[in-house]
Image (tube, helix red, strand yellow):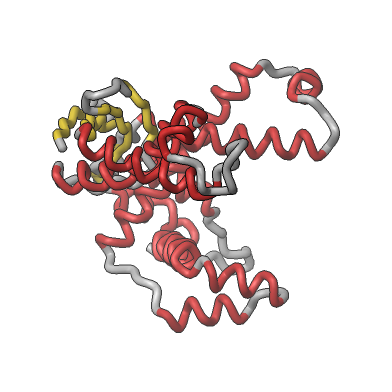
């Protein structure tokens, strides 16, 4: 296998990966053999038609799709190991060349966690939280909102989010909105008309939201690492035990890693609030 990597200014990584023709040919033969076992060809019992006849009747595009389905994950994993990268997202795959008798080629766009400079975030946040520590007789103690803390945290830190990560989150938000709109029995055009927005307006709005949300997620991770904020199994179990019902409990059990991540974020926000 041959692979090459390019890093764009925003941190997006482009892997160019070649799949040797010998691997393609071998996998294609396996796919055809699997298909032949269940193929129904006139004049032959199910799965008993000669392989050559089966090949002539198979949709070549479907065979290529199945070969890619089997080979892409394998060669993508080899490529990231070969180039010693640690992606934080599923790759966006673009198939480039699928020529008979030649190596196949695909591009995989992905990204690693961005570099983060926390700057003087502690000092800046302390200026905000200090107001809540001033006790004035006869007056209620001021409460610092998480919104103000988050705003100060983001303005104090420097991080460039790869565009591909933002695009992936925007696509997720748009898909979620479309599902919700359909449940209401509306078309997207009807929904946009009711909000006075265009499709471009909505996407731009989600781009801003996605960038801020993702930046906050990475910055909180960095703060948690710097301050050695962790979540123990006991804390995860306690959160699961507080589930409203058995279904919710099973969902939390099945997503323990995500739950631990959410708990760690909350502990980090509490840490910031108490600075």
Q: Residue 110 location in percent, x, y? A: 32, 36
The residue sitting at 31% across, 33% down in the picture is: 108
Q: How many marks?
A: 0
Image quarter hosting the N terminus: top left
| Nearest to the observer: residue 55 or residue 264 | 55
Q: Residue furthest front?
A: 43
Q: Residue 76 location in percent, x, y? A: 28, 42
| Nearest to the observer: residue 14 or residue 30 | 30
| 149 left or right of 199 in image | left
| 209 left or right of 70 in image | right
Residue 274 in view: no
The residue sitting at 59% across, 47% down in the picture is: 45
Q: Is residue 140 above or below residue 211?
A: below
The residue sitting at 53% across, 69% down in the picture is: 254
Q: Residue furthest right?
A: 185
Q: Is residue 199 above or below residue 263?
A: above
Q: Residue 243 location in percent, x, y? A: 65, 75
| Nearest to the observer: residue 132 or residue 163 | 163
Image quarter hosting the C terminus: bottom left
Q: Is residue 148 above or below residue 166?
A: below
Q: Quadrant of residue 27?
A: top left
Q: Residue 226 location in percent, x, y? A: 25, 60
Residue 196 in view: yes
The residue sitting at 49% across, 49% down in the picture is: 37
């Amino acid at each position: 296998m041959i692979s090459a990597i390019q890093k764009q200014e925003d941190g997006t990584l482009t892997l160019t990966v070649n799949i040797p023709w010998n691997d393609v040919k071998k996998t294609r033969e396996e796919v055809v053999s699997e298909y032949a076992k269940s193929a129904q060809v006139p004049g032959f019992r199910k799965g008993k038609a000669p392989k050559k006849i089966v090949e002539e009747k198979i949709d070549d595009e479907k065979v290529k799709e199945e070969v890619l389905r089997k080979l892409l994950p394998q060669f993508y994993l080899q490529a990231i190991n070969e180039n010693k990268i640690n992606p934080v997202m599923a790759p966006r795959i673009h198939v480039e060349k699928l020529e008979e008798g030649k190596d196949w080629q695909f591009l995989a766009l992905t990204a690693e966690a961005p570099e983060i400079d926390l700057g003087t975030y502690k000092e800046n946040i302390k200026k905000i939280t200090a107001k809540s520590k001033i006790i004035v007789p006869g007056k209620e103690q001021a409460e610092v909102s998480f919104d103000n803390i988050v705003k100060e945290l983001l303005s104090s830190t420097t991080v460039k989010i790869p565009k591909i990560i933002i695009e992936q989150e925007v696509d997720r938000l748009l898909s979620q909105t479309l599902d919700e709109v359909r449940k209401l029995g509306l078309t997207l055009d009807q929904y946009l008309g009711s909000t006075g927005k265009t499709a471009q307006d909505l996407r731009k709005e989600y781009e801003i939201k996605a960038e801020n949300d993702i930046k906050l997620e990475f910055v909180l991770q960095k703060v948690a690492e710097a301050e050695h904020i962790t979540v123990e199994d006991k804390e995860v179990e306690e959160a699961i035990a507080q589930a409203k019902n058995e279904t919710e409990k099973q969902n939390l059990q099945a997503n323990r890693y995500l739950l631990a991540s959410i708990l760690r974020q909350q502990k980090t926000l509490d840490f910031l609030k108490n600075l």
